[in-house]
Amino acid sequence: MSAPRTMTGTPLPVVLAGARGHGRRHVDNIRRLAAKGLVRLAGICELTPLTEDEFGGELPEQSADLGALLDSTGARAAVICTPIPTHTALALTAAERGVHLLLEKPPAPSYAAFRRMADGVAAAGVACQIGFQSLGSHAVPAIRALIAEGAVGRVRGIGGAGAWVRPEAYFRRAPWAGRRRLDGADVVDGALTNPLAHAVATALALAGSTRAEDVAGIETELLRANDIESDDTSCVRVTTVQGGSVTVAATLCAERADEPYVVVHGTSGRITFWYKQDRVLLQRADHGPEELRFDRTDLLENLVAHLRDGTELLVTPDDTGAFMQVVEAIRTAPDPEPLPDDAWRRVPGEDRRVVPGIDALVAAAADRLCLYSELGAPWARSPHHHLPEEVSTR
């Protein structure tokens, strides 16, 4: 898409909506880019204003009203890192003012809300980057090039695995945490849609199936060990229009925390990508294993480059359409099944619940492209099947 150019050499004035929690990373990143002369933090939108101690220095203008703050500061870009149900309305508030966007993932809690946001942004003619940082990794195009040249033969499928540890307090950190709905509004917080959403989005990117119309069908198995609404132990299998298969398994109840990864299974080898580390292991017939490390492009820096000189955006809304089809499948699936009491245990002194054996099951799902029920997990139920509605291919 074409976008209005900002003046070369002039720092881009940015407003940050949501500066606590995960938003602190955006504060640090904006400071990093400000030191390079690329951006200037013009304002912070928070319901409860930050103190200077919290912020760690002199504060810019603050307001609980994003629209008013954008108007008063003259900001040209907004970083939105707020609760999931607020994303669409805040993104449209910015777009209506001609303000460009970095919108945190997941971009919306439903496919309808996503479409409303994406269409509104497109109509306003503003640039919008979705915050899947893993898709800024230079490993993604490198792996796609390896696949295209047949380095591992014909691709049989792509797996993803995320075995993470989260205390019970994690689900009490905010009113929307661990919820599927709140006050009648969709939230769809869950292992695959929020903390380990990158595993799903990255696997779809390696499959070359990122747009909504690339998805032919979705199977989900959603379970929970914690006393929450949403899933903390789940898996999904996406069948693509090309006939490919993407299977991702995740848990927040691991025995031991591990680095999440995606793996490309070929007929003559495999490519494993630890996406938080930008590290790749290439294993193929008649070759020794090769470990490769890559840089990554920061998504806000990429947005600035797009506005300055037309550099292509790395993660447009349409590039997350397939991921949003997964969110929709999870949203419309039956509520996650509570695991039986004998399937999980508390870790003494650690305020967390563990599902014994789940680490191996997550790895096996990614390795064999199978769902938990197909791997013989005694607590797994038959998968819920979701066929996406016909989507716009504008």
Image (spheres, helix red, strand yellow):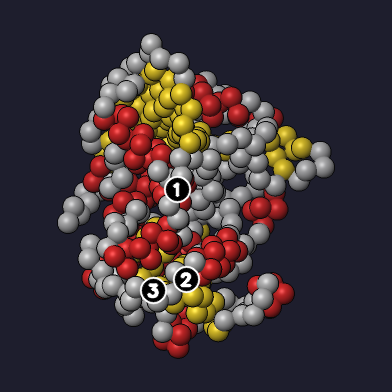
Tell me residue 167's x, y (percent): 70, 47
Give the amino acid at mark 1: Arg
The residue at which mark 1 appears reads as 296
Query: Dot 2 surroundings within 10 Å: few (below 14), some, or many (20 or more)?
Result: few
User: Which circle's residue, 3 or 2, is located before the other in the chain?
Assistant: 3
For residue 37, the mark is: 2
Location of the N terminus (image quadrant)? bottom left
The residue at which mark 3 appears reads as 9
Seen in the picture, residue 108 relative to 65 is either above or below; the reply is above
For residue 282, the mark is: none
User: How far apart in space, not on screen, are marks 3 and 1 (Cα)?
Assistant: 23 Å
Tell me residue 147's x, y (percent): 31, 29
Nearer the camera: disc 3 or disc 1: 3
Which residue: 59% across, 57% down? 177
Seen in the picture, residue 231 relative to 88 is either above or below; the reply is above
Which residue: 52% across, 20% down? 376
Front residue of 317 and 332: 317
User: Which circle's residue, 3 or 1, is located before the other in the chain?
Assistant: 3
Give the amino acid at mark 2: Gly
Tell me residue 95's x, y (percent): 33, 74
Can the viewer see residue 311? Answer: yes
Q: Viewed as shown, does residue 280 lie left or right of 344?
A: left
Nearer the camera: disc 1 or disc 2: 2
- The reply to whether the C-beta atoms of the residues labelled 3 and 1 are less than 8 Å apart is no
Location of the C terminus (image quadrant)? bottom left
Q: Viewed as shown, does residue 15 lie left or right of 93?
A: right
User: How far apart in space, not on screen, are marks 3 and 2 (Cα)?
Assistant: 7 Å
Seen in the picture, residue 36 relative to 221 is either above or below; the reply is below
- The reply to whether the C-beta atoms of the residues labelled 1 and 2 are less than 8 Å apart is no
Q: Quadrant of residue 256?
A: top right
